[in-house]
Amino acid sequence: MNPLLLIIVPLIGAALAALWPTDRTRPWFLPGVGLIHVGLTFWLFLHPPVVAADAWLAFDPLARAVLPAVSLLFLICAAYGVSYLRIRSERPNRVFVASLLAVLGLLSAGHQARHLGLLWITTEAVTLAAVPLLHFNSTPRAFEATWKYLLVGGTGIALSLLGSFCLGYASLHGGGVGDLTFTALTAQGAGLSRPWVLTAWVLLLVGYGTKMGLAPMHTWKPDAYGEAPGIVGAILAGGVTTVAFTALLRVRSVVAASGAGPIADRTLLVIGLFSMLIAALFLLGTRDFKRMLAYSSVEHMGILCVGAALGAAGAAAALFHVWSNSLTKASLFLSAGNMRRAAGSASMDDVRGMTVLTPRSAALFVTGMFAVTACPPFGPFFSELQVVRASLGSGHGVTTTLFLACLLLAFFGLTRVVFGIVDGRPRPAAQANSKKFIETLGVVAPPALLLGLSVWIGLFTPAVLRASWLAAVAQLFPTP
Amino acid sequence: MSGTLNLVIGLAMGLNLIALGSSRLPMLIRAMSVQGVLLGVMPLLMESERLDWRIVLVALATMAGKGVLIPGLLRRAMRAANIEREIEPFIGFVPSLLLGALGTITAVALARALPLLPEHAGTLLVPGSLAAILTGFILLIGRTKAISQVCGYLILENGIYLFGLVLIHSTPLLVESGILLDVTVGVFIIGIIVDRIQRAFDSLDTRKLTTLRE
Amino acid sequence: MTVGLLLLCACLALGTSLVLGYRRPRVWLTWTVAGAVLGLVAALRVLLGGDPWEWQSGFLLGGEAVHLRLDGISAVFLLLVAVGGGTGAVYSHEYWSDRRNPSSAPRGRAWWSALLLCMGLVLTASNGLHFLIAWELFAICGYFLITLDRERSGVRAAGWLYLAASHAGTMGLFAFFTLWASLTGSWDLCPMRTHPELAPLFWLALFGFGVKAGFFPLHIWLPSAHANAPSHVSAIMSGVAIKMGLYGIVRFSGWLPIPPAAGWVVLGLGATSALLGIAFAFAQNDFKRLLAYCSVENIGIIMIGVGVALLAVTHGDAPWGRLALAGALLHVWNHGAFKSLLFFGAGSVLHATGTREMSRLGGLVRNMPWTAGLFALGAMAVAGLPPLNGFVSEWLIYLGLFEVVTGKGTTAWIALPAAIMLAMAGALALASFAKAGALIFLGAARTEPATQAHECGYWMRGPMLALACVCVVMGLAPIIFWPALACAVSSWCPAWAAGTPPAPLATLGSAQLTLALVVLAAATALWWKSAANGLRRGLTWDCGYAAPTARMQYTSASFADIAVGWFRWALQPERKAHRPHGDFPAKAIRLERTPEMVLEHILTPVGDLIMRASATVRRLQQGRLQFYILYVLAALVGIGLLVLVGRTP
Amino acid sequence: MTLILHLILRLALWLLLAPLLPGIINKVKAWVAGRRGPPVLQLYYDLAKLWKKSVVLSQLASPGFVIGPAVGWVALVGAALLMPLGPAGSALSFRGDVLLLIYLLALARFCTAWAAMETGSAFEGMGAAREVSYAVLAEAAIIAAVLSLIVHTGSVSLITMLAPSPGAGAALLAAGLFTVLLAENCRVPFDDPNTHLELTMIHEAMVLDHSGPPLAVILHGASVKLLLFAVLLVQAVLPIGEMTPPAAAGALAAGVLLVTISVGLVESLLARLAFRRVPLLLTTAFLLCVFALLVAWKGDAT
């Protein structure tokens, strides 16, 4: 079966959704396409196709290790989206649904791209396709957020294009033909010209780091996540950042093949820890619970980088963390979205006592908070434990200390905000507003399901999944 | 041959400085569009002996996109917001000119520091592109009008495109055109957002766009 | 019925209570108590049977095979969990009833069962990963129990402090268990005495578990949490939950190779927290805070015992370690018993008067004789007075210290000051509980609510009576408990397996028994004699003062004034005084407050520093796109430099 | 059988001799002051009279008001029975019995304080507060003394422990224990049993409201405590163990008499200290015992 279907199906779905006449039934495209996509993905997951070495697009081990998470996440968010769009029936949803599906298709492309140029194109395309999602609310604040997202993200993505060119030039200068497929670049290995490889690495790290939202390029994140609907935040944080991360992993393997692996790892480690620290400090002070989620996402991107910098074991842990983090974080975004709807604001200053207004969402939010701060039995606990073990195993004592310290600070910040909005007596304004919002099964079940998946992935990680991560690691860290 | 090429690149670099120095938006946009056209010409110059249809295609697309389409869009937005000039930028015009000059020097220095293939060693391709990129950054950081920032972003893209020319043989058409398409669409969407902002805030002064903060 | 089966049934019973008990208090109570009893029996079987129970299954959880073990040490603590959990459940049936707390009582029941389950898991888990899971879940259950009464912001603040501190400890345990796993190559927990490379782990364990155990100076969370929690929760937190921290220390100090300094450090920490903990307690005016600080003291006493045992191990399993460790474990039980009893008493006072200020109470003995009597008994026990149980364990620990001294090694240099500090702590404990008991129950009622107080009902009185009996029995017949202790001690250090009880223990027991009997006889005799001579009620001697009022009685602050003065350097008491002056003084105020010194004078400044850093960093996100792009450029330059600096030539 | 007899004899000895000491002290004071003073047996008369009197209970008091003194008395007598009497040895001796003795004294203190607080009188509260607070330092001093004996003899049982080292150690120990004796028994310079100004009293302030048999029990208990400390002091410093039984008994009696007289002399020569000075003196006592401890340590080290 052709993995291209993963890309084509959602795009066709997007086109159909764009042409579909009525707003009322259009949202059903989301779960429909999502279901097909999940089906295809898992079929491919269980029957991985043989990958041609020079293929530009392929369901290779890395894609196999990550894409199912994105697909699953999208399906559940899509199910949520139906009831969400019913609540937001006052807004036309043609563009929203279409671009959401387009994002799915492009994400599948980005995860499977094995050509640097193609990878860049898809990433940029995802960035652009997400724009209408961000200003769905079309408030001035939403436009401001979109503007910043576009220009910061655009700058970053431009830099990564330059980086891709540099890598190509490295191959040219090293006597290659400038073929930008990862296989070719890796094959050229030490033949690549070192100065250009390093230049490329710096540019690509900053470029894709901007898309991932690593500090200090994270500045677009709180604005975008804060103003976009919860479902969009969930998909951005769970899917788009993942593409950027896998891109970094692929590039890193090229750099490592050229013999500059230690340098790349050191930079990854530094920027990862830096992001964790900055995010933790932001979390200690922020007063808005949707922006809080953005900073928490920055922190987890940092964790991914630290993991990726710690060699094979760390990379496996990082892939694990991709899964657990996307599922958990998405659940938080959805429940936060519910509370934002009900309270009519996202600021600690006017949101209190959500246990009274939206008991279910509040409970889910608190649970999700514990999950995302690495409390058992949820996924992040296990994945972060593996990261810690990898760093201790490779003798990074100081790194581990900093890592744990940042986790602790982040925990302080998150608990402060979460219990601040959940406890206490609700304000009258919020009380009045919450009358309009009913906690139907449609908006409560998806986050609950995501949390359930997070528990499942942690406690009962399927062997086949573990194997897929190891396979991906084997692809990225070829043993000489 | 590389003489003409260098001349064109030199012109493009000069346009950077004009873009930095001019306080009037139409001037800025014009500089940018001319630069776009020049970039379009470049591949033709580089490959003048063995021209093939794909080079021509790319060149024409570039000229159309960078030289006509996007500038037109920006002009429309500018008229809608009826603003003529960039008032009180973060970085004044003289300082930005100096920075630009500095940037150009840095660009040349960087290009010297990096090893180049013989056929590129003679040309100004790499320094030119780096100079354009730095100029773009200066505009993005230094200006307060949304339109000038968009121009900055475009000049940045121009620089990268210029660098892309060193790979003109190796990058296949699909990638080439995909990149071009993406860039164009991207700028187009930016233009749309600028338009929306103009409607929402009825101004293009980004100093108004600071409500989202800690 | 085998131990495994018993534990399984206990688990099922608690699970049932967790599921069914949310709406039905009686059902919940039945199943919880059943679970507790089953756990108790299982622990006893292990302790008296002597051989540990172990169960290894192929069932994977988080990628690790489930491996459970119940040996002497864990059984000692399981026993405590069972007793504390059962009595607390019965007590809460009236104290935190659906009628009085319709919103929080169901939650409270669910979390209670969950807490017991998790503590049981902590005690039986024999795989690092599962231990960590159970540990964190147990901490979270504790948080939700402490904050049952969420409407009060004080409660929420206290709960947050607890959660934050316990998470800090958990981070230490993260490092501890992962380091264990990466050094030994497996998450499985088993004796590792013979692997010297593991020795540094001891310090991680000491920190990680110490936060939960709450010895000085890691006790910061303890006073406010125990004071603000509902009393049955305070009881189990103080009597049982903090012992989980001790369990960690005892368990892993028994398995890890001991660094040479360990004994000294633990002994020193123990002595410090014994003395300072009780000094803080004496200074308190809130009687639940007083009890909480007293827990710090008792943890200190236990740590002294453990420290002596560690010293013994580092000196070739010297026999004196055996007594001290036995004393420490016995004190774990004793403290569990009398501290729960005292918190129950405190709860029924709170229940009756609604205040925790000792200086607002007084004279309750007339309205609540049961509570008063039982509280007095608990006070005598906690002050380590013969013939009650507190004395027995302290006596064993003292003996351990004395033997260290007679050993005349360098170790004596830590044992001598420890013994002296322990003695002072004992005297201060007596002072604190004389103060607490007297101010709450004796004299005249200082405020209106105190006069309206009512005795608690049978559901609350029953557990208190049961615990009081435990205190008396363990005091009068300590020899009965020796086999259990010996079993635990031998599983900690096989070299001490010799089961013969130390002779004096039996003698002490008989002495205590005689003493108790004579005391009873003498008391009745004197009462009878006085009655025969004729009893007349009269005014209290007030030195001829015209109009004495209840407010003129000695208050908590004035009672503690002298000793607090000696410890001013540590307690940093805050005083606000407005002396009366002039011929017709308008008003005079004297406010006294003893802050949590470590928290307010050491940690808060650090926290402020971090918050200032956070404020600075947050200024980066000031909303201007231009700056954001500048950051991108800066990152480019920074990473470029990083690459250049470290480039391998 | 003989054991029972022995026990009864010992009990009788303690109970009957104890009230003699206050009498002697008062005689000495009177003698120094040049008065005739009350008869030596005065306390016996008082006790007999009090025992017959009826009891006045404060309206606020609970049964603890009467039970307290009884328990305290039992505790003190029990402590006394643990104390070996030179050649006669002790009634009950086991490893660590010294701790039981110390904690029995603590029990007595707790009961007295509790009974004092029963009436809610500010004065008795004051007395109780002082009693329990000063006890902290006294306790430290006692345990230091005990430790010095333990270090010296290497034994943790009273019967073998009280084999003092001659010389500096003994002198320091004697000074320390004597001070502790004064403090624990509320004599000048810590407290003045004769004053009637409640503000300045410790022990007397605590028993203001007691009357009849309870008061008798308290007074008798106090005298037992005094004798107990005297005996402890004597045996801790005099090498009684080495003497022949009769000589030992004589030495013991003489020593106790000497201690009593010196208490009397101190009372008549010194004035009561201001309360803020009391801790200072107690700390001195503690330090004396610590020095004794160090001396014992060095003595054995060499």
Image (spheres, coloured by chain):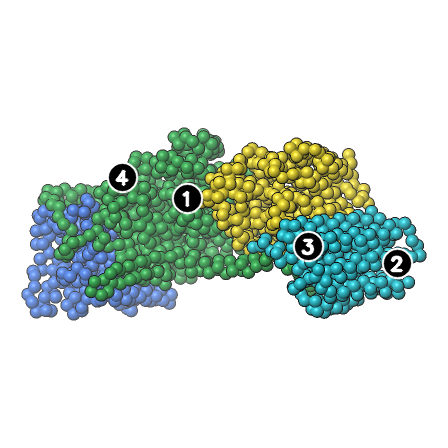
Chain colours: A yellow, B cyan, C green, D blue
In the visual, does C597 lie left or right of B196?
Answer: left
Instruction: Identify the image quadrant of residue A197.
Output: bottom right
Mark 4 residue type = Glu
Residue A155 rendering spot, x and y as whole percentages: 71, 55
Q: Quadrant of the N terminus of chain A?
A: top right
Q: Write down the residue under mark 2.
A: B46
**Local SS, label 2:** helix
Residue C424 rendering spot, x and y as whole percentages: 32, 57
The residue under the point 37% across, 55% down is: C277
**Local SS, label 3:** loop
Callout 1: few (<14), some (14-19), or many (20+) C-alpha neighbours within 10 Å?
few
Residue B9 rendering spot, x and y as whole percentages: 83, 63
Residue C402, disc: none
Cα gap from disc 2 to disc 4, whole angstroms: 101 Å
Q: Write down the residue under mark 3.
A: B81
**Local SS, label 4:** loop
The residue under the point 70% across, 49% down is: B192
* Subunit that carries the residue with mark 3: B
- In the image, are marks 3 and 2 on the same chain? yes
Residue A191 visible: no
Mark 1 residue type = Glu
Mark 2 residue type = Met
Q: Write down the residue under mark 1.
A: C151
- In the image, are marks 4 and 3 on the same chain? no
Callout 2: few (<14), some (14-19), or many (20+) C-alpha neighbours within 10 Å?
some
Q: Write down the residue under mark 4.
A: C455
Cα gap from disc 2 to disc 1, whole angstroms: 76 Å
The residue under the point 64% across, 37% down is: A78
Cα gap from disc 3 to disc 2, whole angstroms: 40 Å
Mark 3 residue type = Ala
Cα gap from disc 1 to disc 3, whole angstroms: 53 Å
